Amino acid sequence: MKWDELEEEPCSMARTIGVIGDRWTLLILRECFLRTRRFEGFQSALGITRHLLAERLKKLVRLGVLRRIPYQESPKRHEYILTQKGLDLYPIMMALVHWGDTHMVDERGRPLLHEHRKCGKMFDPVMVCSECGEPLSAKEVHVHPGPGARPAPERVLLDKKAKPKPRRKAA
Amino acid sequence: MKWDELEEEPCSMARTIGVIGDRWTLLILRECFLRTRRFEGFQSALGITRHLLAERLKKLVRLGVLRRIPYQESPKRHEYILTQKGLDLYPIMMALVHWGDTHMVDERGRPLLHEHRKCGKMFDPVMVCSECGEPLSAKEVHVHPGPGARPAPERVLLDKKAKPKPRRKAA
DNA sequence: CTTCTATAGTTCTAAAATTGAACTGTCAAA
DNA sequence: TTTGACAGTTCAATTTTAGAACTATAGAAG
């Protein structure tokens, strides 16, 4: 499977992965949320090669996650800032951070704490049901095919129909 | 940067990315949440090469996200099932799906709908503050260094201190 | 018994992606 | 006239991934 095929799978998760599902893209986005905006800033914060950084930024712009905005003329320079589509990735970022906080911390404790401006407290992000407000867990959720579904209920990705069968004995 | 260095960054998100931050791992985990448990099941559902599948499963087991459990003797066979650590990835999965549902659907609509058993309704996952219950957005959250932090407030990853400077003119 | 099928891998080569390091170009300041 | 900051681009050398075949075990089919 190629990366771009991923974006066309009848599965929202696969499509999202097609956009942000690689190491560097995720780290670049983390930097965006930490207010990094410029090429050099990303490069020195992440240690990513300039080659890949340029490519990833281009892709994120193309997909509408970042916008490339001039901040000076003369030597033309641009900043990369999150669009609304990009800002909407926030829950994903918080979910990633929270899992790391829960399962990957060492004796020293969490690297970062998060304060919610509205209530002034340090918090953890919690995923809840939009209808009843209860926290969600995998076992309480049942999946149904939606209008954009393709095959059977649980078989949502490609069906590599196991071609007839080559199989052959050596010599 | 190597993958395994990532797991030691003083950043929970980087560490999480070190575990699940690649295309195939994320897709394998999706299958786990859709109840796939066996090698062939993953392989035919995803079209991943057997080589990579074996490697990724091994890694997920090593990191405690999956458990490898025998389900028959004779030709010894095993199933891969989510540990609690793995089940805790659910909010990440839902966040990925929800972003795709919001920004990557075509005219046909969502591929999948989710029903919350507890309240019986179709729902969307919402990320809220554990303290006040309000939905979260990036702009309302302020980041502080925690006990496990390393350098300055906003500079949490490696500081590729731009070595002295090679720079030289050709010829 | 010999072959077929199912399951879970392993091995190998070719192709694609990533790394590391240098190079280009513009303009300002020293 | 040279140096520095910034934003890339280019290219060879590695590393990963894709694709396909091969191994192994054991029950069922013929």
Image: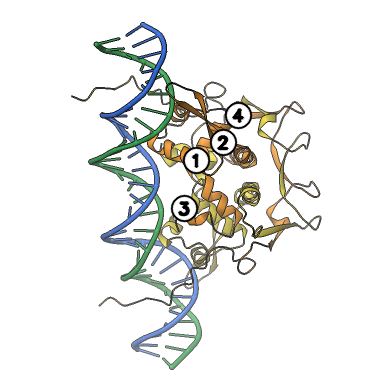
Chain colours: A orange, B yellow, C blue, D green
Q: Is residue B126 visible?
A: yes
Question: Mark 3 Cα within 10 Å, few/some/many (few <14, many 20+)?
Answer: some
Residue A3: assigned label: 3
Mark 1 and 4 residues: CB-CB less than 8 Å, in contact? no
Q: Could you say which quadrant of the image residue B127 lies in?
A: top right
Return the disc, 1 or 4, that comes first in the chain's sequence. Answer: 1
**Gap in angstroms between the C-alphas marked 3 and 1:** 13 Å
User: Quadrant of the rendered structure where residue A150 is?
Assistant: bottom right
CA–CA distance between discs 2 and 4?
8 Å
Please, which chain is the residue tagged with disc 2 on?
B
User: Disc 2 vs disc 4: Cβ atoms closer than 8 Å?
Assistant: yes
Cα distance between the residues tagged 1 and 4: 21 Å
Dot 1 alpha-carbon crowd within 10 angstroms: few under 14, some 14 to 19, many 20 or more: some
Mark 3 or 4: the one toward you: 3
Residue where numbered disc 1 is placed: A25
Q: Residue at x 48, y 35 (%)?
A: B8
The amino acid on which the numbered mark 2 sits, given as a three-letter code, is Ser
Q: CA distance from mark 3 to mark 4?
A: 32 Å
Q: Is residue B113 above or below residue B170?
A: below
- Residue C12 image offset from top left, x and y in percent: 27, 61
Indicate whether A97 appears above or below A144. Answer: above
**Three-letter amino acid code at the position of disc 1:** Thr
Q: Of B146 and A155, which appears nearest the observer? A: A155
| Residue at image mark 4 | A112
Position of residue A141 relative to residue A159, above or below, is above
Q: Amino acid at mark 3?
A: Trp
- The reply to whether the C-beta atoms of the residues labelled 3 and 4 are less than 8 Å apart is no
Quadrant where the C terminus of chain A sits is bottom left
Looking at numbered disc 4 in the image, what kind of residue is underneath it? Leu
Residue of label 2: B12
